Amino acid sequence: MSVADTIRAKLTDRFSPLQLEVIDESESHHGHSGWREGGETHFRVRIATRNFDGLSRVAQHRAVMDALDAELKDRVHALAIEVLPAT
């Protein structure tokens, strides 16, 4: 399973998102710190979920980071998180 698929599965299981995009941005970071041959090192997540209702932006981001803890410790060098309105 690719890292993107793992991220998608974990976030879906944890948050039941109304909308979820997992974008591999590794190629735009070629040659930068943390980049590896084959990519799957730099990601952007766009997520909308009712599970974030009432949480601060920091708490929302911490929840995503907690769900992806293993990936962030191993394969993922950078993760951009965009929380979208759950409408």
Image: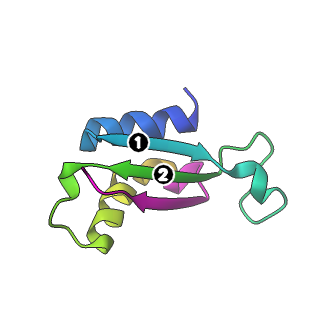
Numbered range of the magenta stretch: 72-87
Q: Residues within 10 Å of mark 2 (few under 14, many from 20)?
A: some
Amino acid carrying mark 1 in the image: Leu
Q: Residue at x 38, y 50 (%)?
A: 47
CA neighbours of label 1 inside 10 A, class few (<14), some (14 to 19), many (20+): some
| Three-letter amino acid code of the residue under disc 2 | Val
x, y percentage for residue 2? 58, 31
**Residue ID at (58%, 52%):** 43
Does the magenta portion include 1? Answer: no
Asked if residue 86 lies left or right of residue 40, the reply is: left
Depth check, front residue: 57 or 84: 84
Residue 30 position within the rendered picture, expressed as x and y whole percent measured from the top left:
82, 56
Residue 23 location (% of width, % of height)? 58, 45
**Tag 2 residue:** 45
**Going by the picture, which residue comes out furthest to the right?**
31
In-image side of 7 versus 2 (left or right): left
Disc number at residue 77? none
| Residue at 19% over, 67% down | 55
Cα separation, mark 2 vs mark 1, equals 7 Å
Query: Is 31 situated left or right of 66 in this image?
Result: right
Determine contact: label 2, label 1, CB under 8 Å.
Answer: yes
Give x and y (percent) for residue 49.
Answer: 26, 49
Seen from this angle, which residue lies furthest front? 87
**SS label for mark 1:** strand
Residue at (47% x, 35% y) in the render: 6
Please tell me whether residue 59 is drawn above or below residue 85 in the rendered image.
below
Instruction: Say which residue label 1 marks.
Output: 20
Most extreme residue toward the left is: 54
